[in-house]
Amino acid sequence: MGRSRYKIHEEYYPYFITCTAKSGLPLFSIPAVAEIILNNLLYVQRQREVTLYGYVIMENHFHAIVLGDDLSKKLRLTKSFMARQIVDLLQELNKFKHLRELQFRKLSHKKRSDYQVWEEGFHPKQIDSDKMMIQKLEYIHFNPVVRGFVDSPNDWRYSSARNYNGEAGLIPVTLFSG
């Protein structure tokens, strides 16, 4: 199917997005890299006026539910900025194996960088009902449980599950009440 399937058409709906590290490389299992993602999720909320309803950061991808005007552009710029921060951090931490992999897997048409941190796109899926929103939030929060990393969604630090359980999460989210 063509790429047009994954576009934001109606910006007044929230969207479930997935951003994946190039070739499934487990970059986000490095706590400082996960922190970059968290900081950028916080930034888009505060500075780019994007509403964040939920998120989870896994070892090689993250999911989020977001809403905002000009969302495609804001997410594209944020991913680009995160990529630069991640490459800089990997260089600082001497993670040369990861850097070589990001360089080797880079698509030939990507000329502006020596590395490609992300798979292309963020695969937005429009959320057009309360039922779908609840299903996507549960999917996000149970992702680490299904993968066998934790027994309970609240045990995964890099998730909004704690926010929805009335506890302090690592970053704030806008709680969906349905």
Image: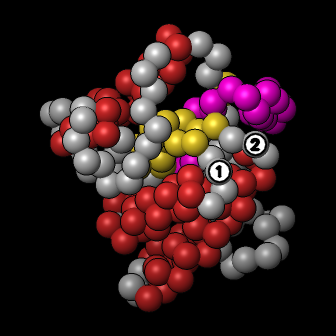
Identity of the amino acid at label 2?
Asp
Q: Is residue 138 above or below residue 3?
A: above
Residue 119 falls inside the magenta stretch: no
* Residue marked by disc 1: 49
Please state the horizontal and vertical placement of residue 56, each as a whole percent of the image. Answer: 40, 43
Q: x, y percentage for residue 153? A: 24, 34
Seen from the viewer's position, the closer of residues 99 and 158 is 158
On the image, which quarter does residue 117 sit in? Answer: bottom right
Q: Residue at x 48, y 86 (%)?
A: 91
> How far across and down, in percent of the image, does residue 116 sit?
65, 67
In this view, the residue in front, 12 or 118, is 12
Disc 2 crowd rating (10 Å Cα; few below 14, some 14-19, many 20+) is some
Q: Helix or strand or loop: what does disc 1 sit on?
A: loop
Q: Nearer the viewer, residue 16 or 167?
A: 167
Left or right relative to 17: residue 57: left
Residue drawn 44% across the image and 52% down it = 60
- Where residue 39 appears, as percent x and y from the top left, is 47, 64
Kindly identify the amino acid type of the residue bearing the numbered disc 1. Glu
Q: Where are the magenta residues, as a range?
A: 1-20
Q: Give above or below for 122 relative to 32.
A: above
Asked if marks 2 and 1 touch (Cβ < 8 Å), the reply is yes
Whether residue 40 sits left or right of residue 157 in the image: it is right
Residue 137 is tagged as none
Q: Which residue is mark 2?
A: 69
Q: Is residue 26 visible?
A: no
SS at badge 2: loop
